[in-house]
Each structure stands twice: as C-alpha cells, then as structure tokens.
Image (tube, rainbow, N blue to C red):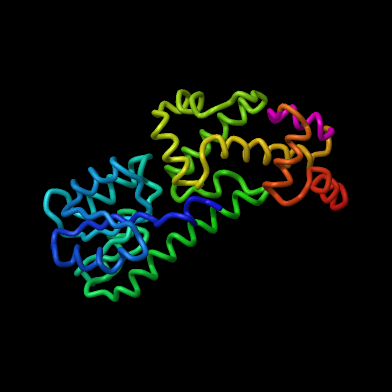
Amino acid sequence: MTNAATRKSTVLVADDHQEILDFIADDLCDSYHVLKAKDGVGALTLLTEQPVDVIISDIMMPNMDGYALCTRLKEDIRFCHIPFIMLTAKNSLQSKIEGLEYGADAYIEKPFSPTFLQAQISSLLRNRQNVRAHYNHSPTSPLQSIALNQADQAFLNQLNQLILENITEASLCVDLLADRMHMSRPTLYRKIKALSDLSPNELINITRLKKAAQLLEEGHYRIYEISSLVGFSSSSHFIRNFQKQFGISPKEWADQHRTSA
C-alpha cells in the first residue's frame, strides 16, 4: 500500500481574505491536511518547509498574486508537478484563459460550491494516482508517462537515462543520482516521491525490471543473463521481484511475446 493511500494529502490554500481562507480550510480539514497562506510569498515559504499535494490560490493578493505564484511554481523543478487550482472572483472568459496560460490545472469562480471544490481536488489527486499506478504495474509503461509538464518530462528523461547508464551496478543509489542531477539528496528524494509515489531506490528497482522486460521481449538473452545485465545479484532475487511487481514471471512474460512475435 502506498503512502498516498494511508495519509491525508496536503492542500495549501492562499487567499488574502481571512474569512475565505478559514472557510476553505474548515471545509477541507476533515479530508486533507490544510496549510494556509495570506499571499504568494507566504505560500512559497510553506512549500519549502513541507511537501504539498495540491495548491488552491486566489488571484488578487498583495506582495505576490496568484498569477505570479503559479508562474514561479511551474518554472521551479521542485514544485512544477503540484496541481494548481486558481480561485477567483474574475468570471470572464479571458481571465479563465489567462489562468490556464499561466499553468493552472483548474480554474474555479467565486462564489463557488465547496462540494465542487472538493470534487476538483479529489479528481486531480485520483488522476495522478491512476497514472502512477499504471506506471508501477505495467512492464512497458515508460517513466516519462508520469510527467505532468515539459519540465517534469525533461527531469524524468535525464533521471531515466542516468539510471540506465548505471543499471549493471548493484550499488546504484540515490547519492549517485543526486550528484549527477546536481540536486541535494532531500530535494531529489522529494521530487521523485511526489511524481511517482516511490522512493529513489524503489524507482531504481522498477527501472531495472522494466529494462529486463524489454530484454525479455527481444529474446536475445537467457533469464540469468538478463538478471545480471540489469544489476540483480542473483536470478532468483530478480525473478521474485519481477513477479511481485508485474504479477507475471519473467518466463511467462518472455513466452507471451515469443508467441505473439
């Protein structure tokens, strides 16, 4: 069971009107862990202190408005994956278009239905979890499939290439990845966890298994050879991991593709 299924997701709400801020927080607190900020600057501070799963932000705020906050976050590799809901009294079509152009994932007009806001948050989180689950359990789903935008895709491309270049090394770990990605270990850990709901070591393991699935499809190597090529210390350990991750044994996977070839 993933952490996402056992803990409350964290929602960050930014609005300079205290009554609206408290109203949204009170409505969401039974289902989510809620953080509150009075403007974009405060929201940025909270984001650096703890992981956030969804952001709800008003547009018109002092110091840093919702547009500027959204732009900052979507340009920052640490935060660009976080779904961003714009909440505003502006109800013109042009303002909706502007919000989406700034990178918002959803746009809700004031006055709004709390039930609709809850449904929007739930939908964003559920869709995210479905994408992660498909990646985790499909032998052929690429790492890039969990990317939410171009910045995340570039990050995942680089990460995937780095893992593949060192895949034969059984000692491959987060420290090497962080050094090569020019990120601190905690920052890389949080980014990988937020995108995939996996730890870096879990992601490395799945990448090994997906590469193994590709080699099994190609049919040029025996299972014990593939086990070594993707960095497992023993073929029995590899077989157990493959079966547990994908619900099928390496031999069954190879036989399926030999039959369909």
> Left of 157 or right of it: where is 226?
right
> Left of 41 or right of it: where is 193?
right
Q: Is residue 25 above or below residue 155?
A: below
Which residue sits at x=24%, y=49%? 69
The secondary structure making up most of the magenta span is helix
Residue segment shown in magenta: 222-232
244 inside magenta stretch: no
How far across and down, in percent of the image, does residue 156 sit?
A: 51, 39
> Left of 257 or right of it: where is 172?
left
Q: Is residue 217 above or below residue 15?
A: above
- Judge by depth and name the residue closer to the eye, 174 or 60: 174
How far across and down, in percent of the image, does residue 25 sit?
A: 25, 63
> Left of 173 or right of it: where is 111?
left
Which residue sits at x=47%, y=40%? 192
Which residue sits at x=46%, y=27%? 178
Which residue sits at x=61%, y=45%? 142
Q: Quadrant of residue 236?
A: top right
- Judge by depth and name the residue closer to the eye, 180 or 8: 8
